[in-house]
Image (cartoon, rainbow, N blue to C red):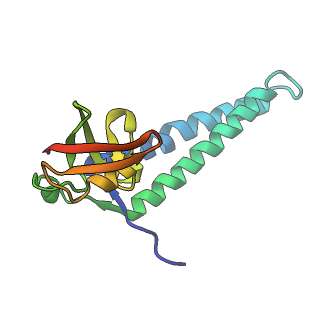
Amino acid sequence: MPPSKAVPVTKAGLKKLRAELQNLIETKRVETAARLQQTREDSPGSHNEGQYEEAKNEQAFIEGRIRAIEQILDNAEVIDEKKAHQKDMVHLGATVTVSVARHEQTFTIVGMVEVDAGHGFISDESPVGRALLGKKIGDTVAVEAPSGQIRMKIKKIN
């Protein structure tokens, strides 16, 4: 079996994943098992069959998420914090402010496991992330979007 691909992650992202794993194992798994047991003990044919199925599905989801997080942690490669503080070039872990059609937007370039577009965390593998990586303040990049090409000028790198 070939080695798994390294998963880039920030220290904060690693801490968040470890906390989620601990919560899933110590709390969610136990709660769901208890709920599953309770619905199993209720009389057969009762209105609780739906609750039993729901508990089984939740248990399967939790176990799958535990396995996924464990695999991520096994392959995690923490982003070099010193490099992340360089402000001359966009890199993994950098927070970038760009100008798009006279509006400013800020993105933090992260690995796939930390993506949260609603909070500005975009993947290094996304079209915007790929376009920004390696660029400097003042550079303009073009990103293909469903609505057409979007031009972004890099204003600031943190």
Of 2 and 40, nearer the camera is: 2
Q: Residue furthest bottom?
A: 1
Residue 6 picture location, percent across and down: 38, 66
Q: Residue at x 86, y 23 (%)?
A: 46
In the rendered view, tell whether residue 155 sits above or below residue 141: above
Q: Residue at x 33, y 56 (%)?
A: 130
Residue 79 picture location, percent across and down: 25, 58
Point out the image quarter for the N terminus.
bottom right
Classify residue 103 as left or right of residue 146.
Answer: left
Q: Residue at x 40, y 52 (%)?
A: 112
Of 24 and 115, nearer the camera is: 115
The answer to whether residue 143 shows anywhere in this view is yes
Q: Residue at x 46, y 70 (%)?
A: 4
Classify residue 93 as left or right of residue 158.
Answer: right
The answer to whether residue 14 shows anywhere in this view is no
Residue 92 picture location, percent across and down: 26, 55
In the rendered view, tell whether residue 6 sits above or below residue 142: below
Q: Residue furthest right?
A: 45
Residue 98 picture location, percent across and down: 21, 40
Quadrant location of residue 39? Answer: top right
In the rendered view, tell whether residue 108 sits above or below residue 124: above
Of 23 and 3, nearer the camera is: 3
Classify residue 131 as left or right of residue 24.
Answer: left
